Image (cartoon, rainbow, N blue to C red):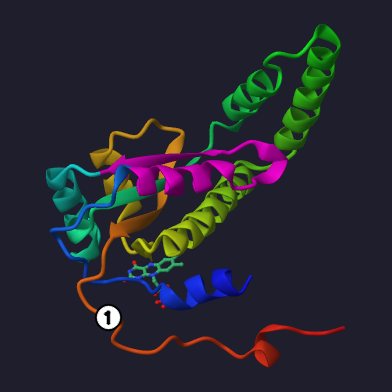
Amino acid sequence: MSSFLNNLEWRFATKSFDKTKRVKSNDLNQILEAIRMAPTSFGIQPFQIYVVKDQKLKDKLKLNSFLQPQVSDCSHLLVFCEDTDIKNKIKAYIKESGKGKGLKDKVSLKASQARVTAWLSGLSKEQANNWAKNQTYITLGFALAACAELRVDSCPMEGFISNSVNKILKLPKSQNSVAFLALGYRADEPKSKKVRLSKSVLFTNI
Ligand SMILES: Cc1cc2nc3c(=O)[nH]c(=O)nc-3n(C[C@H](O)[C@H](O)[C@H](O)COP(=O)(O)O)c2cc1C
């Protein structure tokens, strides 16, 4: 555990990346695997992650991110998108869980599909979208922790114009960009020390 906490101490939201350094594909794959392994409600994984390494595309995205330099100077930019086509995601989940299973298990999976779909139909569109977005943010947290363990610097970001990013990436209608994670290597050490509220403020023992 101490190494996990040390990793969190090491990481910071990196504003200034060394443009010459690229994240190794093995490290990148491990970060993506951490995202894949993150838990989500019902296991439905209602998200899509775009891995952007094309410089022209990153430059274009920077123009729609209030000119924040991390977007174009990073090695790879992960774009976290919620996917609100939840019915399709449920179907994909059931298909994946049914692989290699017998008829009896498949019948019980169909019943689970019906239960989750019924739950979904009780949500308003806005509630369903919020739900998908919340699941997507869980994966952002896992990616941040994975980066720190691998000593890959990162910057989580919400400072961009989502509609424009959706258009640039030609996202299907069901997808919506919610966060970026710029990856790479710091050009400078953090300029200030970490600021966090104290445990006595954040936690309540009852
Ligand atoms: C969801 C989210 C959105 C953020 N958006 C931005 C952003 O657009 N630009 C930026 O420079 N930092 C952004 N940050 C970084 C935070 O400002 C930073 O994580 C926070 O101040 C704590 O500092 P630390 O990460 O260095 O410990 C964001 C962080 C999170 C988690």
Find numbered disc 1 in the image and state the secondary structure of the residue it sits on.
Answer: loop
Residues packed near mark 1 inside 10 Å, few (<14), some (14 to 19) or many (20 plus)? few
Q: Which residue is mark 1?
A: 189
Please give the count of numbered marks on the rendered protein.
1
Q: Residue 151 or 206: which is nearer the viewer?
A: 151
Q: Is residue 81 visible?
A: no
Query: On the picture, is 13 further left or further right than 97?
Result: left
- Please name the residue shown 75% across and 32% down the image: 116
| Residue 33 part of the magenta-drawn span | yes
Q: Position of residue 6 (x, y in %)?
A: 51, 76
- Give the residues drawn in magenta, as a range: 26-52
- Please name the residue shown 64% across and 70% down the image: 1
Query: On the picture, is 74 further left or further right than 1?
Result: left
Q: Position of residue 94 (x, y in %)?
A: 68, 22
- Please name the residue shown 30% across and 55% down the image: 161
Q: Position of residue 38 (x, y in %)?
A: 59, 47
Image quarter where the C terminus lies is bottom right
* Disc 1 residue: CB within 8 Å of ligand 1: no
Examine the rendered structure and indicate whether residue 117 appears above or below residue 32.
above
Examine the rendered structure and indicate whether residue 92 appears above or below residue 195.
above
Examine the rendered structure and indicate whether residue 152 appears above or below residue 94.
below
Q: Is residue 128 visible?
A: yes
Q: Residue 176 or 136: which is nearer the viewer?
A: 136
Query: On the picture, is 32 further left or further right than 78?
Result: right
Which quarter of the figure has residue 18?
A: bottom left
- Please name the residue shown 60% across and 75% down the image: 2
Examine the rendered structure and indicate whether residue 154 appears above or below residue 119.
below
Q: Amino acid at mark 1?
A: Glu
Q: Position of residue 16 (x, y in %)?
A: 22, 71
Query: Where does ligand 1 appear, by image quarter?
Result: bottom left
